[in-house]
Image (tube, rainbow, N blue to C red):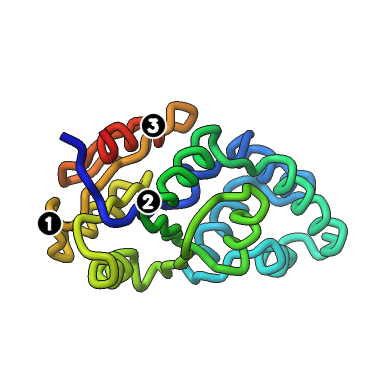
Amino acid sequence: MPLIVKAVVVDLDDTAVRYIDGLNGFYSIWAEQGINRELAEQATLELCDEFCFTFENMIARLRRHNPRIDPPALLRRLNTWFAENLQSYPDTNHYLTAWLQEKPVIILTAGNAEFQWPKLRSANVPYQEVFFASPADGKARYLHALMRRFGTPIAFIDDQGENLDGIRRHGMTAAEVITFLMRRPDLPQKLGSRHYHHVVRDFCEVNRLIQG
């Protein structure tokens, strides 16, 4: 029997969209500026934790390690890399568009809206609404609000087991939020999860479970 749901909540990065070369090209650009990968990765994580990651903020943070960096020129390089490498997965637009004919499709992404909005526009991801979850808030409070609006059950698809586990820690049951752990075959395996989730490789597998 299909798991009939009232709404579908979808993560963005590594679930609906991806960088074609991962982040190798991104860190190579920094290496050309004399910034090694360790420093660049540290700055990326810090800015994400502070909920303020943008290319401009990263340039400002790392420029102290190389004052000769030309911010406008570097920003152009980074924006070009972004435009050439970001794309939605081949199944994303097909299934999200189909689901939208029958139910709300919500994008729930962790990240600074200033950086995440261009991803949605560039990859042309279909959706009804978008929410940007900060590290402090997490995604659980948005799921609570969506349950109150649309009823239950809701499908929640994310590539981070920790995000899905957080739903269970906040008391939402499998009858209220049906969780799907996305494991795209082209990406390295990530940490597992403490709770049970439906493990899927693409939206086609999700669709078979929620549509029959």
Which of the two labelled residues, at mark 3 and mark 1, occupies the earlier sequence position? 1
Residue in the picture at 17% in, 65% down: 170
Secondary structure found at label 3: helix
211 vs 61, left or right, is left
Q: Are marks 2 and 1 in contact (CB under 8 Å)?
A: no
Spatial separation of the CA atoms under disc 2 and disc 1: 24 Å
Secondary structure at numbered mark 1: loop
The residue that label 1 is drawn on is 173
Q: Quadrant of the N terminus?
A: top left
Q: Which mark is residue 102?
A: 2
Residue 112 drawn above or below residue 165:
below
Determine which quarter of the picture holds residue 62.
bottom right
Residue 102 percent across, percent down from the top left:
37, 51
Identify which residue is drawn at 56% across, 70% down: 52
Q: Within 10 Å of the Cα at label 1, are there few (<14), some (14-19), or many (20+) other Cα atoms?
A: few
Q: Nearer the viewer, residue 7 or 67?
A: 7
Asked if residue 6 lies left or right of residue 136, the reply is left
Q: Quadrant of residue 88?
A: top right
Q: Nearer the viewer, mark 2 or mark 3?
A: 2
Q: Secondary structure at mark 2?
A: loop
Which residue corresponds to mark 3?
A: 204
What amino acid is at disc 1? Thr
Residue displayed at 83% across by 55% down: 76
